[in-house]
Amino acid sequence: MTDFLNSVTLLTNYIVVPGLTYGSQLALGALGITMIYAVLRFSNFAHGELMSFGAMSTILVTWLLQSYGIKLGFLPTALLAIPFAALITVLYCLLTNSLIYEYYREKKIDPTTYLIISVGMLFFTAGLIRFIIGPGDQKFNDGTRFILKARDFKEMSGLNEGLAIKTTQGITVVVTILLVAILFWFLNKTRTGKSMRAYSDNEDLALLSGISPKRVVMITWVITGILATVAGALYGLDKSYKPFTYMYLVLPVFASAILGGVGNPLGAIVGGYVIAFSELIFTFAYKKVFTYMLPEHLAPKGLVQLLSTDYKIAVSFVILVIVLLIKPTGIFSGKTI
């Protein structure tokens, strides 16, 4: 029985807890892509850099607060900075919309041109971020590092394997639950949210009903900016902030959105957790798990690893390709909020 509990603890420590954390970050990122696609009808390839912009803004505000001696005790100071960083990111989104996207939207250009514009915005935002904060690794996590330490868990349980839960992991899951609950309440219960859903379902009919398209577009960018900031900041808190990382993060985020069904918020959330757990399950070394579960003479000598961690990003790519080949509309057929 002890060996079984050790194996469960091992899997919880290296797959379940990181999977819930990473899945929450991907889900928030995918929700931002979903909102843009559902309302504005284009795939925003700059969303990864928008998350990076939000994280950068959080870091700068965190440093400002820390310089004045403002802290949150055992919690990261970044939690205080996120609302201000979200405001900065929202203003950046509204500025890019008014200067770039709105002009092309009035011209009623095709989705391919929109895609090219978003790629251009990706490189512009990436360059702006590196100009402001530089390309290096930035750590901004202060406060208590662990909710539960592996050593403390071993002492409490008497097991050989420890279970560690970082403060940032707990914060990520809790914040994601709260933000998703607020978003779903807003979309389903408020007049503005219902207007956005109506505009997404049938733009012409929504216009005839007196819904203002400019207001819907503005609110969509506001929501996207908030989601991008929170997702980027939580990812940076959990893994440290490096600008180059976010450019590659766009693949698993897009894979999450497409897997769940682009345009469907519930699908984006489910897709985020599926992608996160898939990456971890396929790249985890199961040697110790099988050592606990099997008789000694059957214990494996190798790592028992399906893929090296170097190929973690490939898991997202393969899932993306399979979904596009088998069911392009995703688990929950998309294009509706």
Image (cartoon, rainbow, N blue to C red):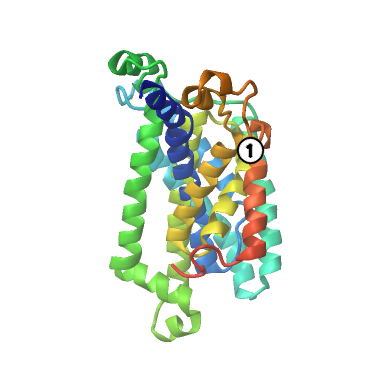
Question: Image quadrant for the N terminus?
Answer: top left
Res 65 seen here: no
Image position, residue 264 (x, y; %):
47, 64
- Residue located at (42% from left, 31% from top): 12
Image side of residue 62 versus residue 134, left or right: left
Question: Image quadrant for the C terminus?
Answer: bottom left
Front in this rendered view, residue 325 or 115: 325
Q: Secondary structure at mark 1?
A: helix
Amino acid type at circle 1 is: Lys
Image position, residue 277 (x, y; %):
51, 42
Above or below, 40 against 149 in this view is below
- Residue located at (56% from left, 41% from top): 52
Image side of residue 288 versus residue 3, left or right: right
Image position, residue 239 (x, y; %):
52, 30
Front in this rendered view, residue 87 or 257: 257
Please tell me how many numbered marks the rendered image carries. Answer: 1
Disc 1 target residue: 312
- Label 1 Cα crowd, 10 Å radius (few <14 / some 14-19 / many 20+): some
Front in this rendered view, residue 328 or 237: 328
Above or below, 336 against 53 in this view is below
Q: Hey, which quadrant is residue 281 in on the image?
A: top right
Image position, residue 269 (x, y; %):
45, 53
Above or below, 211 against 88 in this view is below
Image side of residue 236 versus residue 123, left or right: left
Q: Hey, which quadrant is residue 157 in on the image?
A: top left
Image side of residue 126 versus residue 62, left or right: right
